[in-house]
Amino acid sequence: MYTQSFTVGDGKQNKPVPLTASTEDPLKQAAFDAKIDADGRIEPQDWMPDAYRKTLVRQISQHAHSEIVGMLPEGNWISRAPSLKRKAILIAKVQDEGGHGLYLYSAAETLGVSRDKLLGDLHSGRAKYSSIFNYPTLNWADVGVIGWLVDGAAIMNQIPLCRCSYGPYARAMVRVCKEESFHQRQGYEALLVMMKGTAEQRAMVQDAVNRWWWKCLAMFGPPDADSPNSVQGTRWGIKRISNDDLRQKFIDATVPQAQVLGVSLPDPDLKWNAQRGHHDYGRIDWDEFWNTVNGNGPCNKERLATRVKAHDDGQWVREAALAYARKQQARATQEAA
Ligand code: BYC
């Protein structure tokens, strides 16, 4: 449904941008710059400028937080899934999101930051996570729409990250994208089944699409002109395709899928523009987006409280795992002596 090819767009966003000057070590900086220019991979043991490290910690940790907070809206439906088959699929999907969080926290740890610090930032509200997870899942169709549109948008954003300049992040993304493709397809298939059902089921799907569509478009981040991190992120080979170009690719891929499904997308301005070779679309409500990103969306407080409670409730599990690991280590040392 989504291309797995790693094309990097039309080069518009690859226009030369001066590198951020570093006073840290000119020789090491030059070697780093040369590697980036040659489209090479930076590995944890390589020297890197502080600003590059900081940017990666910011992005990878926000991404990890999004995965584990993203477990919550769908997790709410595990006990209410309409059949054993749907329940099994949903449990597997939510578990996958937890796994993605773990790969990503591990990738962030290779940059010298501890998981405790990152989780502390999430739980105190200092760290961001994706805006999309601050909206409620009101009915079963929302679960299908999250798979189809939210995971669909996530794949569109994450495929270029498989080619990002930081090795551990890029490698984690390859596996994440494969799993996200399954998530997207299961959501679409669940919706196809509902659309073949009763008029009420079709209305539920349309209602869910109406509520999620604009929020999914905002997931790609602010317009390029208002995106403070884009220029440097692109220069460093972290960002391969701009926010607006990814948003456009997502819209162009989704319109025919909506037609097959038999739903309409809630945008009167959405129409094919033959001259541009893309769909035109209406205005995204960026005030609502920033309000949500800044902690005031409909579910921000609830999501954070649930996450903190889950962490606190899991304290005994972490303690038990550590005690077990220590015991195993002591036994191995004793046997080796
Ligand atoms: N929500 O200069 P910009 C998933 C922030 S997981 C909240 O364009 P950048 C899934 C941005 O952080 C989906 N904040 O930034 C999981 C920045 O603030 P700071 C998560 C957002 O980094 C489970 C400011 O706005 N995916 O889908 O160049 C189940 C200015 O933005 C958002 C990732 O994290 C947003 N939507 O580009 C199902 C992918 N957008 O940090 C599904 C990795 C922007 O300067 N991340 N902001 O204070 C990225 O690709 C990039 O970080 C972004 C933003 C495209 C998100």
Image (cartoon, rainbow, N blue to C red):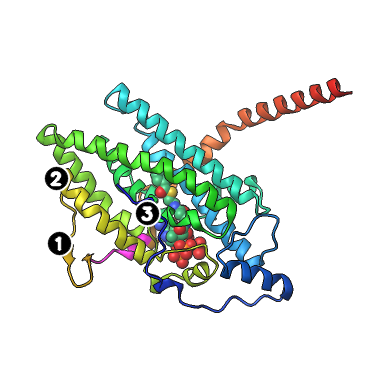
Q: Residues within 10 Å of mark 3 (few under 14, many from 20)?
A: many
Residue on which disc 2 sits: 262
Give the residue at x 26% y 54%.
253
Q: Residue at x 68, y 53 (%)?
A: 112
Which span of residues is magenta-colored? 281-289
The residue pinned by badge 1 equals 268
Q: Amino acid at mark 3?
A: Met
Q: Earlier in the sequence, mark 2 or mark 3?
A: 3
**Three-letter code for the amino acid on which mark 2 is drawn:** Gly
Q: CA distance from mark 3 to mark 1?
A: 24 Å
**Residue 62 left/right relative to 33:** left
- Relative placement, left or right, of 108 versus 255 is right
Q: Position of residue 256 (x, y in %)?
A: 19, 52
For the C terminus, which image quadrant? top right
Which kind of residue does numbered mark 1 sit on?
Answer: Pro
- Residues at badges 2 and 3 in contact (C-beta under 8 Å)? no
Mark earlier in primary sequence (3, 1): 3
